[in-house]
Image (spheres, rainbow, N blue to C red):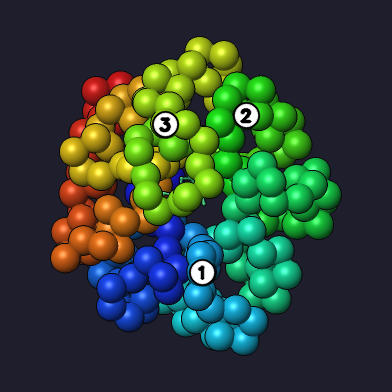
């Protein structure tokens, strides 16, 4: 959970395969393929890119998670699926993929408790800071939301997400998250490898302080 990189073709300034290779070299520990937004790939093109990225993850022994697309996840036999609150019946999804990693986006303790009860393997909590990557996000929460979830007894693995970069990653993990999840901090960085390494260092520093 330390450095969870999320990306689709629209997030990249160079070939997605190249961005992912560099990010993994820098120390990304988990990857999510998220093909979203106006003009994004669909059907066969989406699957073809997914296959390429899955291959790269496998070579690097990093789990490959699919965002929101259960059919794609199943057809690729990916390692897991990430869903948001609006992405269908989470209980039904859990039933259909009992042995895969299932991650759920949550915004408060109630959603977190429900997700855990249903059997989510980890929680994505955010937006912690302002982000322009996902347009339909809730209000910015700050890292105190992570503290609140821990105080309310949520022990499931948590990644903070939304506007996280090297400069603010420490605070999120210090607050109780197991790691940070980012799109642009890595995908738009001129040096994705260095960006990933910087994030990993901050997360590990914060682990030492806990
Ligand atoms: C693990 N989500 C919330 S904010 C955001 C996304 C995609 C944009 C971050 O971009 N948690 C997980 N996966 C998800 N897909 C979400 C939450 C939903 P940036 O890092 O550029 O600010």
Closer to the camera: disc 3 or disc 1?
A: 1
Q: Is residue 207 above or below residue 161?
A: above
Comparing labels 3 and 2, the label whose residue is closer to the camera: 3
Mark 1 neighbour density, 10 Å: few (under 14) some (14–19) many (20 or more): few
Residue 62, given in percent of the width and then of the height, sits at 44, 62
Q: Residues within 10 Å of mark 3 (few under 14, many from 20)?
A: some
Task: Tell me what residue is drawn at x 51 percent, y 74 percent.
Answer: 40
- Residue at numbered disc 3: 140
Name of the residue lying farthest toward the top:
151
- The answer to which quarter of the image holds residue 42 is bottom right
Task: Give 174 or 87, whichever is nearer the viewer.
Answer: 87
Question: Horizontally, is 145 left or right of 84 in the view?
Answer: left
Q: Say which label, 2 or 1, has the lower sequence index.
A: 1
Please state which of the two labelled residues, at mark 2 or mark 1, is closer to the viewer.
Answer: 1
Pick the residue in front: 24 or 184: 184
Identified at 70% across, 76% down, the residue is 75
Q: Earlier in the sequence, mark 3 or mark 1?
A: 1
**Residue 38 tag number:** 1
Q: Is residue 194 visible?
A: yes
Judged from the image, the secondary structure of the residue bearing numbered disc 2 is helix
> Percent from the top left, x then y, of residue 18?
30, 78
> Which residue is painted at 75% across and 45% down in the image?
90
- Would you name the residue on which mark 2 appears? 112
Placement of the N terminus among the 4 image quadrants:
top left
Front residue of 157 and 192: 192
């Amino acid at each position: 959970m330390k450095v969870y990189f999320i990306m689709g073709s629209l997030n990249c300034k160079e070939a997605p395969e190249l961005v992912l290779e560099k990010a993994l070299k820098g120390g990304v520990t988990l990857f999510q393929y998220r093909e979203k937004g106006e003009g994004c790939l669909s059907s066969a093109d989406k699957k073809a890119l997914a296959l390429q990225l899955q291959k790269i993850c496998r070579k690097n022994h990093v789990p490959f998670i699919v965002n929101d697309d259960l059919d794609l996840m199943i057809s690729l036999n990916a390692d897991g699926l990430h869903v948001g609150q609006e992405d269908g019946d989470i209980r039904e999804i859990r039933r259909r993929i009992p042995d895969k990693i299932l991650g759920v986006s949550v915004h408060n303790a109630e959603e977190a408790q429900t997700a855990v009860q249903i059997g989510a393997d980890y929680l994505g909590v955010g937006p912690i800071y302002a982000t322009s990557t996902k347009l339909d996000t809730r209000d910015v929460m700050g890292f105190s939301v992570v503290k609140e979830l821990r105080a309310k007894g949520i022990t499931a693995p948590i990644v903070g997400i939304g506007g996280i970069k090297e400069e603010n990653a420490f605070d999120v993990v210090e607050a109780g998250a197991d790691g940070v999840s980012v799109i642009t901090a890595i995908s738009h960085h001129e040096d994705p490898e260095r960006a990933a390494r910087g994030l990993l260092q901050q997360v590990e520093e914060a682990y030492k302080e806990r």
